[in-house]
Image: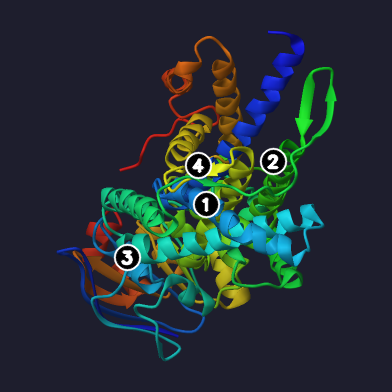
Amino acid sequence: MLQIENLEVCYGAISALQGISLTVGQGEIVTLIGANGAGKSTTLRAISGILKPKAGRILYNGEEIGGLAPHKIVERGISHVPEGRMVFPGLTVLENLRMGAFRFNDTARFSKDLDYVYLIFPRLKERESQLAGTLSGGEQQMLAIGRALTGDPKFLMLDEPSLGIAPLLTKTIFAKITEINQRLGIPILLVEQNANLALAISQHGHVLETGRIILSDTSLALRSNPKVRSAYLGG
Amino acid sequence: MSLSDFFQQIINGLSLGAFYALIALGYTMVYGVLRFINFAHGDVFMIGAYCGYYITDRVQAVFGGKLMWASALVVLLFAMAVCAILGVVIERLAYRPLRNRPKLAVLITAIGVSLFLEYGGQFFFGAIPRAFPELIPDLPVGGLGTLVITTNQVLVFGVTVALLVALNYIVKHTKMGLAMRAVSQNATAAQLMGVNIDTVISFTFALGSALAGAAGILFAVSYPSINPLMGILPGIKAFVAAVLGGIGHLPGAAVGGIILGIVETFVGASDYSTYRDAIAFAVLILILLFKPAGIFGKATVEKV
């Protein structure tokens, strides 16, 4: 489905990704773990077109998408829930969800997708006409994910969905992520600093360190890997 | 000052404020999506007035000198269309290549574009002031005692209100308007939703410049002597109005324009009329001392 080959990305003179390769298959959840600044978010930003790759290829269903404008990538059904949620604070919840469906002109389709989002996150329906800026962190995360779903994604990228959210709510959100993956069959590329959670719901994992993938394995194997345990799983 | 004088000044102030409001909306919309002040905006207003100067006779000839309101409307729409295209071209040629450069570079370019339009205007239109043709015979249409409302004032208010209603509809209820608001709140997130940011920016320039073009026609109708430097002072004052209302805030720009127009008119009618611009700016300084983000602006801390 998604295939990255020797991807390099720079911020000016600073190299952020030094040639990484990975694949995400149909229906899979793949996770990237690693410390701050390892290049996890950079990888997602390069896939969604916010950053331009310096070298390497990004293939989506066999088509090269590296370097396309972000809206061209969204048109192909790739949806990126960015770090820090980035909901539109001055728009209502409903308007935010409408923005998620920006690539469609079909209102019947929107109301169907909206029903589905409200089914997964009933809280959003209650807050429909409220400004997104007034929501709690957890609700904003639900909105950010819901907003990606109204765009009917074929491939979903989630960046730090647990960041700044109460532990109990994090569990709920991760349960929803699994539900979305299983019920809709959407493959997910997940970046998460809570490696325990990420490895628990994913099939494959990659460990990034200063712009390189130093370890790739099944999530099950990574959880019992002593190196991963000491560095990322707290012993 | 008698009561009817007072209301007369209110009417004059509202009409001056209407020009400022229309121009200020363009400043504030562009600031919203690009976070930069388009200093060439006042000169787009001047181009709007010249569109009217060159086309009015022809349009009135087509209508056979009848249907003055209809021909006025055609002139207005023509000026708005020309200015919309001009705004889009300016952004495309001068600002877009500098999109990812330091903001200062774009700001200086905007000043350059402004000078280019002013002195290009002197070259093509001539530096001497021109008499703006009469769009509609300026007759009193109604009044109360010594209070008089003229055709031109009706035109100014009618067109301004219609444009504000249309703008509000576009921004609040259309897909492009939603995209504009989204881009102004978080451009990266808007891109991730599939918004083509270049389209939204072009659209914003077209919209703002069309309003400035309309203001140019209305201004020339009210003060029928036009020259290529006529955009400078109204441009700066409209910028002040936009800051006064809270830059980036649409109703704020309109309200800021009206306040500035009324203050200026009342000072102009008083014994201190020589100081009317100084007092207008003093009001700005006072408001900003107490409300640094403007009347409607929220105090925000720039994120690093």
Disc 3 element = helix
Disc 4 element = loop
Classify mark 1: residues with Cα within 10 Å, few (<14), some (14-19) or many (20+). Answer: many
Classify mark 4: residues with Cα within 10 Å, few (<14), some (14-19) or many (20+). Answer: many
Same chain for the residues at labels 4 and 2, yes or no?
A: yes
Residue B68 x, y percent position in the rendering: 78, 53
Residue B139 x, y percent position in the rendering: 78, 37
Which sits in the foreground, A54 or A173? A54
Which sits in the foreground, B24 or B216? B216
Quadrant in which the N terminus of chain B is drawn:
top right
Disc 1 element = loop
Same chain for the residues at labels 3 and 4, yes or no?
A: yes
Residue A194 x, y percent position in the rendering: 37, 56
Q: Are marks 3 and 4 in contact (CB under 8 Å)?
A: no
| Model colouring | rainbow
Q: Amino acid at mark 1?
A: Val
Tell me the distance, in whole angstroms, between the alpha carbons under discs 4 and 2. Answer: 24 Å
Tell me the distance, in whole angstroms, between the alpha carbons under discs 3 and 4. Answer: 23 Å
Q: Check the residue under mark 3 and report the chain it is in.
A: B
Q: Earlier in the sequence, mark 3 or mark 2?
A: 3
Same chain for the residues at labels 4 and 1, yes or no?
A: no
| Vertical side of B227 occupied by A99: above or below | below
| Residue linked to disc 2 | B156
| Residue linked to disc 4 | B248
Q: Amino acid at mark 3?
A: Pro
